[in-house]
Amino acid sequence: MLSQSEDPVMTVVTTMRKARVLASKGDVSAAIALLNGVSSDAFQVSLMELKGDLQLKNNEPVKARESYQQALDLAGDEARPILVMKLDNLAVEG
């Protein structure tokens, strides 16, 4: 499916979904590597948030905090309360 789609939006959405599936099967490192290969301005906030979630699941809280912060910075004025909560939780833990 990834190689079949010429629509960049569908490619990013499919890649994010595949990363979630890989992580749910226990291959978190492969999921993160998959996301590292994605470049899409339109989805950067969601990509960085998902990457942070996976890094946290992979026991990398410092990297997760950096990814969440980058996602929040990219979001600008867009309200992202769950993202803020994730970042705040890591600040308390770390």
Image (cartoon, rainbow, N blue to C red):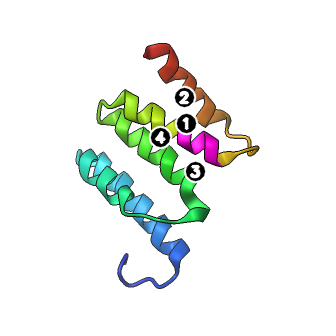
Seen in the picture, residue 62 relative to 35 is either above or below; the reply is above
Residue 31 on image: x %, y % = 31, 53
Quadrant in the picture for residue 43: bottom right
Question: According to the image, label 4 marks what residue?
Answer: 67
* Residue extent of the magenta highlight: 69-74
Quadrant (top left, top right, bottom left, bottom right) of the N terminus: bottom left
Left or right, residue 46 beside residue 55 = right
Tell me whether circle 1 and circle 2 mark residues in contact (CB < 8 Å): yes
Residue 58 falls in image quadrant: top left
Read off the residue under disc 3.
45
Distance between the alpha carbons at the discs numbered 1 and 4: 5 Å
Camera-side mark, 1 or 2:
1
Image quarter for residue 59?
Answer: top left
Q: Which residue is mark 2?
A: 87
| Quarter of the image with the C terminus in it | top left
Question: Considering the numbered disc 4 on the image, is that residue within a helix, a strand or a loop?
Answer: helix
Q: Residue at x 55, y 56 (%)?
A: 44
User: Which numbered disc, 1 or 2, marks the residue that appears first in the sequence?
Assistant: 1
The answer to which of 63 and 79 lies nearer the viewer is 63
- Mark 1 to mark 2 CA distance (whole Å): 7 Å
Which circle's residue, 3 or 1, is located before the other in the chain? 3
Tell me if residue 67 is in the magenta stretch. no
**Contact (CB < 8 A) between labels 3 and 4?**
no
